[in-house]
Amino acid sequence: MRTTLCITICLLLIPPVRSQERRLSLLFAGDAMQHLPQIDGARQEDGSYHYDSCFYLLKEKIQRADLAGVNFETTLGGKPYSGYPLFSAPDAFAQSLRDVGFDLFFLANNHALDRRSGGLERTIQQLDSLGIRHTGTFTDPEKRSLYYPLMVICNGIRIAFLNYSYDTNGIPVREPNVVNLIDSLQILQDLELTRLYKPDIMIVQLHWGEEYRTTPSPQQQRIAGLLLKNGVQIIIGHHPHVVQPMVVEREDHQIRNVIYYSLGNFISNQQRELTDGGMLAEIVIHKKDEDSPAVITSCSYSLVWVERRNRGRQTRYRLIPWPDENLPPLMEADKEKMDTFVQQATDIIENRD
């Protein structure tokens, strides 16, 4: 069990933290999706839905992190459950992600309004009832002004989380609901406000880029440059459903900032090349004392691959971590698929020619 004390902050004035612990480990996952075959595969004979078997091989790794976040790319819009193009997943999906160790759900993505206003509001209500911290969408502007940016104090380090999406698939955001969209002026205003909270680290999660493109687009690079210029140290991207490069900027042998342009898929039913897995971003932050700046002391990644197993009329899904010395037995064909994914993804992430 994780014993880290983390506190979510929504007040403008944050009192000094006197904790002596100054190390913080972060883990971020990509697109947590629910296509219809996944929903069908999680259905039990009694009509309930169970997802624990999807994630059990990753539970220990996720829970080792002090904070773990995921791009929650579906809604909890209620029945009838549905997959692409208008997602609505069972509440049990969010509960399983929470139980495996995810503390933070990022909701600003192009599927946030798949069940329109009712789906957005029910998603927020259900996450609140499960005790899951989230950001990126809001029931009304007042909630946004109270809870955005999402401020978390963990191990004596103040983290500000911001979250934006490029669009909502053309579905208009109806008042009073709010979905954070990528708008340079709005982002700059939000960053100015965020600095008033005196965070040690600012992290921006962006739903951006072009689907199935393995290199960042000019727009991604432009937005990243704007964020870094304005004090953001960590950028986490998703939406392309494939991994993109990880870029680390150093100064005097110290990590200044890091961009994970796209983490790819965490779990989905997508099967085209490079969509059957993704990466986990793993970052460690240190702070010597209250008056010292926080520094990124390491940034790395690992991979996950989605195993699909047919069980009668159902397909069961299981996430396989890589690297892992204790990999479960795999069918030879599956092992070949995973090896291919690992090699291709590694080349892309590390920007190998």
Image: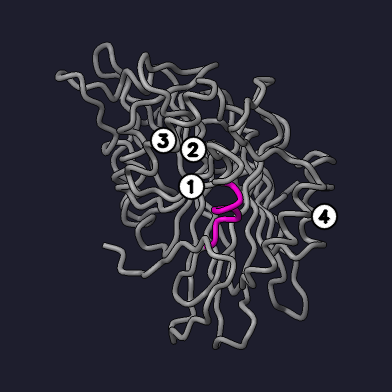
Type of amino acid under label 4: Gly
Q: Earlier in the sequence, mark 2 or mark 1?
A: 2
Q: Earlier in the sequence, mark 1 or mark 4?
A: 1
Type of amino acid under label 2: Phe
Instruction: Say which residue appears at 60% left-offset and 42% top-offset.
Output: 345
2 and 3 marks in contact (CB < 8 Å):
no
Q: Which residue is mark 1?
A: 134
Q: Which residue is mark 2?
A: 72
Residue 183 horizontal side relative to residue 4, left or right: right
Q: CA distance from mark 2 to mark 1?
A: 9 Å
Instruction: Say which residue appears at 42% left-offset and 30% top-offset.
Output: 122
- Binning the other alpha carbons within 10 Å of mark 1 as few (below 14), some (14 to 19) or many (20 upward) gives many
- Say if 116 sits above or below 93 in the image: above
Q: Position of residue 113 (x, y in %)?
A: 56, 25
Q: Which residue is mark 4?
A: 225
3 and 4 marks in contact (CB < 8 Å):
no
Q: Which residues are magenta?
A: 144-151
Select label 2 or label 3 by which is in front.
Answer: 2
Instruction: Say which residue appears at 39% left-offset and 41% top-offset.
Output: 127
Please state, as top left, top right, bottom left or bottom right, where the N terminus lies in the image. Answer: bottom left
